[in-house]
Image (tube, grey):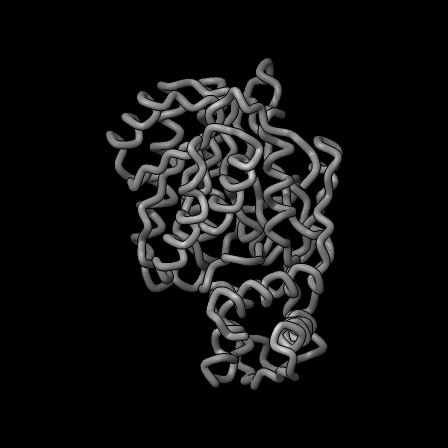
Amino acid sequence: MSYNIPETSKTYLVTGAAGFIGFHLSKQLLEQGCNVIGIDNINDYYDVHLKYARLEVLKPFTSFSFVKGDIADQAGLMALFETHKPNVVIHLAAQAGVRYSIENPDAYIQSNIVGTHNVLEACRHHPVEHLLYASSSSVYGTNEKVPFEESDRVDHPVSLYAATKKSNELMAHTYSHLYQIPATGLRFFTVYGPLGRPDMAYFGFTQSYFAGRPIRIFNNGNFEQDLYRDFTYIDDIVEGIERLLHRPPAAEEKAPHRVYNIGNSHPEKLMVFIETLERCLSQSLGREVCIEKIFEPMKPGDVPATYASTSLLEEAVGFKPKTSIEEGLQRFTDWYCDYYRLN
C-alpha cells in the first residue's frame, strides 16, 4: 500500500488484535511507524495457534504492546485506557460467526454487547479523537433491495450475531449523542485472505479438501438461485479503515456518528467463488484440484445475498475496494499451502 494515512504521533488501540482484521490492521499501522496497543483474550472459538502465529508477526515491532485481556472485563479495560491513553480506538474484538450464535448465544452477549458497552464507557471517561468499530453486513438481514445502502432499514436481523451488531450501532450512536464521542461504524462484507478465520467458508472448504472430506453447500443445489456474497479482500478492508482513521464525523453535530459499508460491490455466486478457489489451489499446488460437494438446505441465520453500496465511503475518502476474487483467493491459497507446508 503506497498511501500514508496514519499519524505516527498518535497511539492506536486495536481490540481483537490477534484476530483476522485486527492483526492485518495492526501490522499495517506498525509498518508505517505507528504506536499500537493490542488487546485480545485469545479465546478458542477457532485454532489459537493461528492467533499466536499472527502475534508472532507483530512481536518484533518495538512500537507494539500487547495485553492479553477481555473487553468484557470493564476494570481491566479502564486500566488499559488510563495507562496508554489511546488517541484513536479501532474496536474489532467480537464473538464472530452466524451459526455459532445459535449454539452459544451467551458468548455473543458477553463479547459483543457487554464488551462494546465497556469500550464506549472507556471512551466516555478517557476521551478519544475517534472511535471506529466493527459492524457487519449481517445487519441487513433478508433485505431484498440491492445494493445494500446505509440508509436502508435494518430492523429485521435473522441471527443473534446480527442483532448484537445492530445493537452496537445503536449503542455507539447513543454514546456519540450523549457524550460527543466521534464514532464510525464499519459494516464489513465477507472478509477473506491470508491468515484468515478457519470458521469462514473459503477456509473451511480448503481444509476439507486437504482432509479428503466433501464440502457442504447450503443452497439446496439450486444453481439458478445460488447464494451471492460480496467477498472483500483483507487489504481493501484495512485500506478503508486507514483512510477513515482521521476522518471522524463532525463534532458540531448532535450525534457525531456515521456508518459505512466496506464491501467489494461485486457479489459473486458462491459456486463461482468455489470454482475460483479450485483454480487457485490448482495453481498453488501445480496439479488439478476438484473439491467434492454435497448440497444441503440453507441453515437458520443464513441470507441469500449480500451486496454493498460503497458510495458513502467513496464520497468520504475517495476509496472503493477493488481486489478481484481471482487475485485475493490466489494470495490466500499460496499462503495456506505455505503455512501448512502442503507444497
Image location of residue 323, percent across then percent down:
71, 54
Looking at the rendering, which quadrant does residue 13 occupy? top left
Left or right for 198, reference 232: left
Visible residue check, residue 42: yes
Looking at the rendering, which quadrant does residue 59 occupy? top left
Residue placed furthest toward the top: 252
Left or right for 338, reference 70: right
Q: Residue at x 64, y 40 (%)?
A: 239
Visible residue check, residue 177: no
Left or right for 196, reference 95: right
Q: How many discs appear?
A: 0
Image location of residue 182, percent across then percent down:
53, 23
Q: Residue at x 52, y 46 (%)?
A: 24
Left or right for 264, reference 122: right
Looking at the rendering, which quadrant does residue 314 occupy? top right
Q: Residue at x 45, y 32 (%)?
A: 36
